[in-house]
């Protein structure tokens, strides 16, 4: 069974920084993409950043404030967030497009989510 487990959310003041981490575990054969999405109350889940082999993608609202990194050997992905704004408040979900050992294709997997609150 494959699991994605996030850590690192919390409460931070505007202009502050947070680091989110996610570890994929279980019987994984290969990981194509790992990344982060977020969902604010009353809004749809949206992409924040993703990292595939040699390719990273950021949402426009990131504006250079966040940095995503992957450790392929450890099956982890981190999101370093700086200059946080109140509008960054949301539940952040780890995402993985991966193939389990018993699978025949890449499928999406999600973590349980971690709350990020930006408030003074």
Image (cartoon, rainbow, N blue to C red):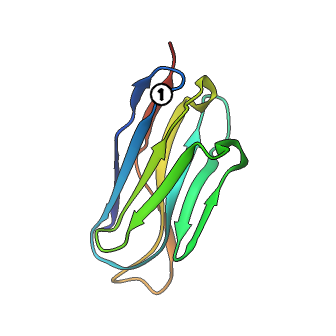
* 108 or 20: nearer the viewer: 20
SS at mark 1 in the image: loop
* 108 or 24: nearer the viewer: 24
Residue 55: x, y in percent?
Answer: 59, 72
Residue 24: x, y in percent?
Answer: 33, 63
Q: Residue at x 41, y 83 (%)?
A: 103
Picture quadrant of residue 27: bottom left
Q: Is residue 51 above or below residue 21?
A: below
Residue 44: x, y in percent?
Answer: 67, 41
Q: Residue at x 46, y 87 (%)?
A: 104
Q: Is residue 16 above or below residue 52?
A: above
Q: Is residue 52 left or right of residue 57?
A: left
Q: Residue at x 50, y 12 (%)?
A: 120
* 59 or 113: nearer the viewer: 59
Picture quadrant of residue 115: top left
Which quarter of the figure is the N terminus placed in? bottom left
Q: Which residue is mark 1?
A: 16
């Amino acid at each position: 069974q494959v699991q994605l487990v996030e850590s690192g959310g919390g409460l931070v003041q505007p202009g502050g920084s947070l680091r989110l981490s996610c570890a994929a575990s279980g019987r994984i054969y290969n990981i194509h993409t790992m990344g982060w999405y977020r969902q604010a109350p009353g809004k749809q889940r949206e992409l924040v950043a993703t990292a595939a082999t040699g390719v990273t993608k950021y949402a426009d609202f990131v504006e250079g404030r966040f940095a995503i990194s992957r450790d392929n050997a450890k099956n982890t992905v981190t999101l370093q967030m700086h200059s946080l704004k109140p509008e960054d408040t949301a539940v952040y979900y780890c995402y993985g497009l991966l193939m389990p050992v018993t699978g025949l294709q890449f499928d999406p997997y999600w973590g349980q989510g971690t709350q990020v609150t930006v408030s003074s």
